[in-house]
Image (cartoon, grey):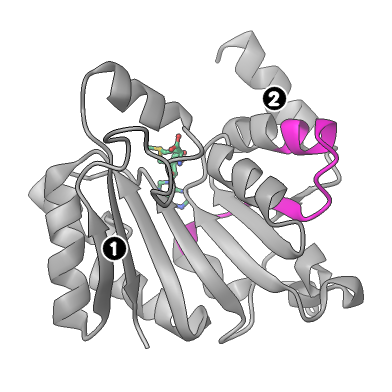
Amino acid sequence: MAKNKRHKYERVKHLPNVAFSVFGQPGAFCTYPWHQERYKGLEIILELGCGKGEASLALAAANPFKLHVGIDYKSHRICVGAEKALEQGLENLFFLRARIERIREFFSEQSIHEIWLTFPDPHLKHREIKSRLSAAPFLDLYAKLLVPKGMVHLKTDNDLFFRFTGDCVKNWGGRVVETQENIHRGDGSGSVGSDSVSCFENKALSKGLTIKYMAFTLN
Ligand SMILES: C[S@@+](CC[C@H](N)C(=O)[O-])C[C@H]1O[C@@H](n2cnc3c(N)ncnc32)[C@H](O)[C@@H]1O
């Protein structure tokens, strides 16, 4: 393993704004920071598969009275976002190292106002379809966590994933509220999600790909 990555694996363990999954311990649910009394009443926004957390950093800075949690299972990526959040003094942003499949173990039902899926892995092979973060079993999870009319936002450069998500949402019984085929068209001003550019978004833009956006509800 690269030295830089190894250092991040070590550093992330000591960051006060990073939570790690604790399973099989009674009461573990309440130990996650977003359940603290001082955050009671704040809207909670999740970014699933946050990587280095660029979207969460931008959202947390723009919405100081909302609580943001970036979730990813790669702790060296989370480390980058969490260190930036500390540098920027963002007290309303946490990171959680966990698998999205287990997300219900960390948050109460109907407690999440928005979910962001930022450049999810498209999992192009047929046998991987079930791993796509907008496949029906994931929509089931999100529907349990979201408050009524809570919104899911998707940003992706992948046409197949974009169409797949639209179909999945409709087949599931959800509602696609908005789609944009190219959020950076023109000056991008006013386009949802165009004000932060993540690591994977940058890579896509440098290849000349367009960035698509979809918003949908599940309840
Ligand atoms: C293509 S990257 C995008 C990262 C970031 N959102 C961006 O735009 O730069 C997908 C991220 O999702 C994470 N991921 C994929 N499947 C996951 C899962 N089941 N649970 C947790 N994280 C997952 C990966 O570790 C990776 O960091």
Give the mark count. Answer: 2
- Dot 1: what SS? loop
The three-letter amino acid code for the residue at tag 2 is Lys
Compute the Cα span from label 2 to label 1. 29 Å
Q: Residue at x 86, y 45 (%)?
A: 16
The three-letter amino acid code for the residue at tag 1 is Ser
Q: Which residue is drawn at 16% across and 78% down?
A: 170
Q: Which residue is drawn at 76% across and 64% down?
A: 65
Q: Would you identify the image quadrant in which residue 130 lies?
A: bottom left
Query: Dividing the image into 4 quarters, which one contains the C terminus?
Result: bottom left
Question: Which is more N-terminal, label 1 or label 2?
Answer: 2
Is 104 in front, or is 214? 214
- Horizontal side of 71 relative to 8 (left or right) equals left
- Dot 2: what SS? helix
Residue 85, image x and y in percent?
76, 38
Q: Which residue is drawn at 66% across and 29% down?
A: 80
- Residue 74: in sight, yes or no? no
- Give the labeled residue for mark 2: 8
Question: What segment carries the magenta color?
Answer: 82-100
- Horizontal side of 188 relative to 29 (left or right) equals left
Residue 214, image x and y in percent?
29, 59
Query: Dividing the image into 4 quarters, which one contains the N terminus?
Result: top right
- Give the labeled residue for mark 1: 134
Residue 186, image x and y in percent?
29, 33
